Each structure stands twice: as structure tokens, then as C-alpha cells.
Amino acid sequence: MTGRSGGAASGGGSDGAAPAGGAPIRVAVVDDQTLVRQGILSLLSLSDEVTVVGEAADGDEALELLEATEVEVLLLDLRMPRRDGIATLEALAARGSAVPVLVLTTFDDDELVLRALRAGAKGYLLKDVTLAQLVGAIGTLAGGGTLLQPGLTDRLFRAVAAREEQVRGIERPEPLTARELDVLRLAAAGYSNAEIGTALHLAAGTVKNHLSSVFAKLGVRDRTRAVLRALDLGLLEADR
């Protein structure tokens, strides 16, 4: 099939993060398996916080779709024929695309997670999530945030720790303070700024300032890359 625009999804509400009363978030779905893709589309049709504006069966179709259609969040499978998910992420980065990508896949593969995040994905979920979790993740990305499925982060720690010998020579940045490390660990676990503030008894603005300092010290621009950089540097312990 070719990438094509679709009608707006509509239906009952959900627990997603889209602003109340705002326009639905414009989403496109990329998956080579027709039944899976249609299943995701049917699931999203139950929420009035998102509207599906297109679908594609591989990365080439996805790139064509994005040229022709305004998309706010792209849901992307990783293992597809022709141009796969990683190659699609790399092509989007080369084009300077600002569309946030949520990787949604059945493959529970640590190396794929790391490759996808390094290629520019802003979030990663397995396909067994609930509608509320999926819509919430879409809302997070549409709002400029990043997201890792709870449970994946701990395994990422272990995957990176298992390759410790590969990162011993990485240049060390300016040390993070104990409080910055606390904030970063919670961010790595998927906590929002408000949740971090509650856990650490800090104002939301203070949490934001700590994260900004972490980003500056690690030489990154967002949470996902901060977590990856910290993992590479061994700043986040594998048993946390």
C-alpha cells in the first residue's frame, strides 16, 4: 500500500495527556503488518484526544506521508521491509524533521531501544500498552516531552553496564551534584517534572532548573539523550 491520509478518529474519552478542550493531536501510524496497524487505528479511534491523519506500511511511505500531511506525533514500528524504523528515524533527522517519533513495537530488544533513541526517537513503548498509556504517551511527546516505558529503563541500565568496557575512555563531563543525580534518576524512570518535585519535595521550577543544569553539563538537549549519555558514563547505577 501507499502512505495515505485518514479521517479523524473519534469516540469516547481516555486518560491521555492532551490538553482538555484543545484540538485532537494529529497522529500517523507506520507498521508493515496490516492487522496490527488496523488494530492500533481502531484502538486510537476510541479516544477523542487524538485523530489519525495517515498510515503507512514502511519507512518510505512514512516519509512520503510526512511531506504531504501535517503530523504532530508519528507512531513507528522498527522492523519493516524496505526502509525500517531505524533508517526512517535517521532519514527524518537528516531532513531536520521536528515531528516527535514514538516507537511502538513488539520487539523487547535492548539494543534496538538504544539504537532507536540514539537515532532520534522521543519515546519507546511495547505494543501491549493500554489505550490510556498510549494516548498519554502521545500527549507527552506532542507537548515536547520524552518517554520510556516503565521497566525498560532498568534493563537499559543493565544492557549498558554489560558493555562497560566500551565506554571507559569517554571524556567525563563536569560532575553532577547529588541533587542533579536524584532528578536525573527519576527522569530516567519516566517521572514528569511535577512527579519528581513531589518525590523530592521540590518546586516544579526547581526541578526544571536542575534538569537544565544536567543537560548543560552532559552536552545534550533533552531527557532521552541525557539518560543515554549518563548511561554511557556510568552515572546511573545498573541496580537502580
Image (tube, rainbow, N blue to C red):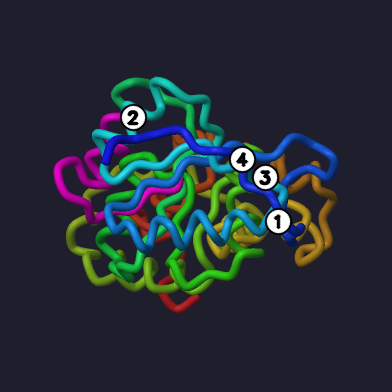
Disc 3 or disc 1, which is closer to the eye?
1
Is disc 3 in contact with disc 4, using a CB cutoff of under 8 Å?
A: no
Q: Name the residue under label 4.
A: 8
Disc 4 or disc 1, which is closer to the eye?
4
At horizontal 61% and vertical 65% (from top left) the residue drawn is 131
The magenta stretch is 75-91
SS of the residue under disc 1: loop
Q: What residue type is labelled 4?
A: Ala
Alpha carbon distance from label 2 to label 1: 26 Å
Q: Name the residue under label 2.
A: 92
- Where in the figure is residue 130, as x and y percent of width and height? 58, 70
Is-magenta flag for residue 88? Answer: yes
Q: Mark 1 points at which residue?
A: 16
Disc 2 or disc 3, which is closer to the eye?
2
- Where in the figure is residue 24, as x and y percent of width and height? 69, 39
* Other residues around mark 1 within 10 Å, as few (<14) / some (14–19) / many (≥20): many
User: In the picture provided, is 219 more to the left or to the right than 177?
Assistant: left
Q: Which amino acid does label 2 sit on?
A: Leu
- Say which of 89 and 34 sits in front: 34
Alpha carbon distance from label 4 to label 2: 24 Å
* Label disc, if present, on residue 193 of the rendered structure: none
SS of the residue under disc 2: helix
At horizontal 50% and vertical 54% (from top left) the residue drawn is 41
Identify the mark nearer the N-term, 3 or 4: 4
